[in-house]
Each structure stands twice: as C-alpha cells, then as structure tokens.
Image (cartoon, rainbow, N blue to C red):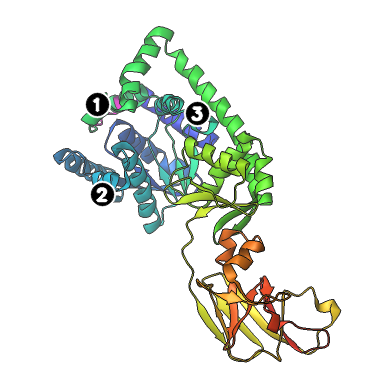
Amino acid sequence: MKYINKIRNSVLNFIQAENLTSPGDRILLSVSGGQDSVCMLDIIYNLRKKLNIDIAIGHINHQLRGEESERDEEFVRTLSKRYDIPVHIETIDVASYAKKNRKNIEEAGRIIRYQYLKKIAQANKLNKVATAHTAQDRIEWLFLALMRGSGAGGLSGMRPKTDFNGITVIKPLLSLFRDDTYHYLKEAGLEFRVDKSNYDLSIDRNYIREMIIPLLKKRFSPTVFENILRSIELIGEDDDYLNARADTFLSTNSEKSPFGFIFRVEHLSDLKKTILTRVIRLACKRLGTIYPPSMDNVLRAVSLFKENISGKSSPLTEDVFCEVSENMARIGREIDTIEFQYTVDSIPASVDIPELNKVIQFETLEKFELDKRDFQFLINTSNINLPLRLRNVRAGDRMNPMGMEGSKKISDILIDMKIPLWDRKRVVIIEDKAGIVGLFPYRLSERARLRIGEKGILVREVK
C-alpha cells in the first residue's frame, strides 16, 4: 500500500502543479482497458474526492482486433460496474475510415478516438477528457518527431493540458513511467488487457518502445530519460514563447472573415520563418482542424507567401489551404459559389444577406453635398427604378462603369480593381429591370452617377 500511495501522491502533485483540474470538473477518462488506462482509472477514482471532481469512462471500440476488441469493450464495462461510475462506449470502423481518408491505421485511430471522446464528453456535459499517456509516451513521441523532421512544437511533444477543438484534454500520468503503472497495478491486484498489436515491430512506435528505449536504458542508465524529459520541457518553454509571439501577430495583423484569416502578404513575408510557421499552424488550429498541417505543407505555404504570385495556392490540411491574390493572403477553406437573391421594394430598407454575413441598408438622401462623399455608395434615383434586386455575381455579367464608355465584364472590373479572389465572391450586384446599377461596395454604373444637389439613395453595410 505504501507504493500505491506514493504513486497516487505523485499524480496528485502533478495535477495540482499543472492546474489540470478545478473543483466541479466533470472528466471523461479515456479507458482502453490497457495497463496505463486502468492505472489512471484507479488513481483518479481514488483522488476524485480530494480533487472535488466527477468522472465517467469513455471507451472507443476500433473494431480492429475482432473478438479481442469485443473482449476489451466487455472488460471496460466490467470496470465501470466495479467502480460504479458511468461508461460511454462508441463502436467505430477505423479500418474503413483509414482507407477512405488515406490514413495509416494508427493515425486514423488517433483521429477517430479524439473526435468521439469529444462527442461523448459534450453529449454528457463533461468538460474535460483525460488520457493515460505517460512520460515514456513523451519520449517515444520525441523520437517519432525527430524522424519526421518536426520543429520545436513536435519535439516538445505531449503537453499536460491542451485544447482539442474546444474541449480540454489533460494527461495526468505524465509524471509516471510505464514501469510505474505496471507495478502499481501489480501491487493493487488489478488486471488489464494486453493489445498484442503493441508488439508488432513493423510499427515505428512499437520499434522505438521495444528496441530503442531498452537499448538507451542499458547503454546510458535510466537517468538518461530524465535528461531527455528535461530537454523536452526546455524545448516546450521556447515553443510557448514563440507561439505567444505568433498569437500576437495573428490577432493584430489579420482579419478574421467568413473565408478564414486574411493578411497583407508583405506582413507575412517580413516575418522570421520560425514565427511565420507558427502563425500558419495557429490559423489552422483556430479554423478547427483536427491535426496541424505537416511541416512540408507549412514550408510550402511559407514559400508561397515569400514569392507572392497572385492566383497561386497550396494545401495545408485535408480541408484548409492558403492562397495569394492581389498582394493579399488567405488561410481558410475552399469557397463554394455563394448564391443569393433579395429584393428591395421601397426605400428605406434593410436587407439581411446571411450567406455573406452582411446587412445592407438603403436610405434616402435628399440632396447630395460634397461632404457626403465619404459614404460607401450613392445612387442617383432619377435613372433607377424600384424594385432593386440584390444578387451574387454570375458568369457573363457586364456593366458600364462610372467614368467609362461602353460595358465591361464584371470579372475584369474586379481584376482591374485588384480585388482578392475571395472578396470577389462577396460582391453584391445591385440591379433594376434596366440592368446592373453597381457592384457593392466597389463600383457604380455610369447611369447611377449622383451629382451635387441631386436626390439619391445612400447604400451602406451595417457592421
């Protein structure tokens, strides 16, 4: 019992030092049935009153090991009854997901696991998810990150507390090694499930665990792992500082639009690469990507911003990419054609266009004076007939721009005005029966020109 109390106190001290929990937390414990997760369940169960938290069990059946997966699920159900706490189980065909999304089984399983743990937590009003990663997992992750050529973010590896798309994930066992969890269970007389696939040496992580870690331990003594963990902590501190710099830049030098994050290319290209790569990753995270973009994709984006060739784009994740247009840059998702149509039958009027997240107001202007030129859009009423129609740009649209003779394609007008590609999709065509009156908020037609002293319509967007 002395050893058990020692381990529980170690975990309690770690939880308190890292502020992993708060009184009143409702925490979903991710329990596979394996050694580390069963250890976490028993420790947190016995600390729950000291921490003033409620707990539940979450289990994901990946359907990868046939009857063994079913036995894992049944074992977790038995644990739930033994500890008298709720259990929530999801059964997912990970192999099909991996094939459909062109992922390896391990990566697909990780993505699915976090997605469904978040789903379970939110459905049951649980505000945190706890996973049973240990200090040894951090070291294994470091070697994997080195082999992938990761930066400081990858090398600093698993953090005690992270945000996963709006839910807090904590790792309360990061102060323990796998030997600690094994001896804890042995001392407590607790059984656990063994996943034989963990010994498949064709999987990189298993090879590191079974071959490289024991070799290092034998050659350099167990204290080498304490030194490696100290290096991970130091790298993490540097990474936190650089991430804070990137966060400040993103907050002050970007516009968050319905199409993602918009930047001036010159602001991005002036950044040091170590900050720019973090800005790119942070933007992806804020857009809700499940996992960060690969370093290869990030470096391609860096080159794209440095080259500043209008019209070029590059993928970052499965559904987020970056593009450059007219000295502006965007990090966001693909923009589909936005179709809409609304009618203005009388003035004044207010038109809500939810497709663009815009509200456009039409007001009567009794007499145009010079000091009114700062308004966005002024339309001459003498040549315009109600009703007006507001719609999206369509292929083949033409207009006679104010100050020009003859008509011109809308697409060419927007290109000449150097309007970025994504903003062209937010242009509102204003027209009457006679044709296009203007491209809000950029350009009027010649027949809508308002001269000093004339009556008109003031058109503006309400923020």
Q: Is residue 254 magenta?
A: no
Q: Secondary structure at mark 1?
A: loop
Say which mark, if any, is on residue 155: 3
**Disc with the residue nearer the chain's start (3 vs 2):** 2
* Kind of residue sitting beneath label 1: Asp
Is residue 20 among the parts visible in the rendering? no
Helix, strand or loop at label 2? It is loop
Tell me which amino acid carries mark 3.
Leu
The residue indicated by pointer 2 is: 92
- Crowd rating for badge 1 (residues with CA inside 10 Å; few <14, some 14–19, many 20+): few
Pointer 2 or 1: first along the chain: 2
Find residue 168 and report its horizontal and vertical position in percent. Answer: 47, 47
Give SS at disc 3: helix
Q: Quadrant of residue 176?
A: top left
Spot occupied by residue 221 in the image (x, y as percentages of width and height): 42, 10
**Mark 1–mark 3 distance (CA, rounded to whole Å):** 24 Å
Q: Nearer the viewer, residue 104 or 206?
A: 104
Question: Which stretch is magenta?
Answer: 187-191
Name the one closer to the observer, 216 or 341: 341
Q: Which mark is residue 404?
A: none
Task: Please tell me whether the stretch drawn in magenta is mainly helix, strand or loop.
Answer: loop
- In the picture as drawn, the residue positioned furthest to the left comes out as 67
Q: How far apart, in angstroms, are the residues tagged by discs 3 and 2?
A: 30 Å
Q: Amino acid at mark 2?
A: Ile
Query: Relative to 305, does residue 451 appear above or below in the rendering?
Result: below
- Neighbour class for label 2 at 10 Å: few (<14), some, many (≥20)? some
Residue at x 36%, y 40% (from the top left corner): 45
Q: Are marks 1 and 3 in contact (CB under 8 Å)?
A: no
Q: Is residue 190 magenta?
A: yes
Q: Quadrant of residue 6?
A: top left
| Disc 1: which residue | 200
The quarter in which the N terminus is drawn is top left
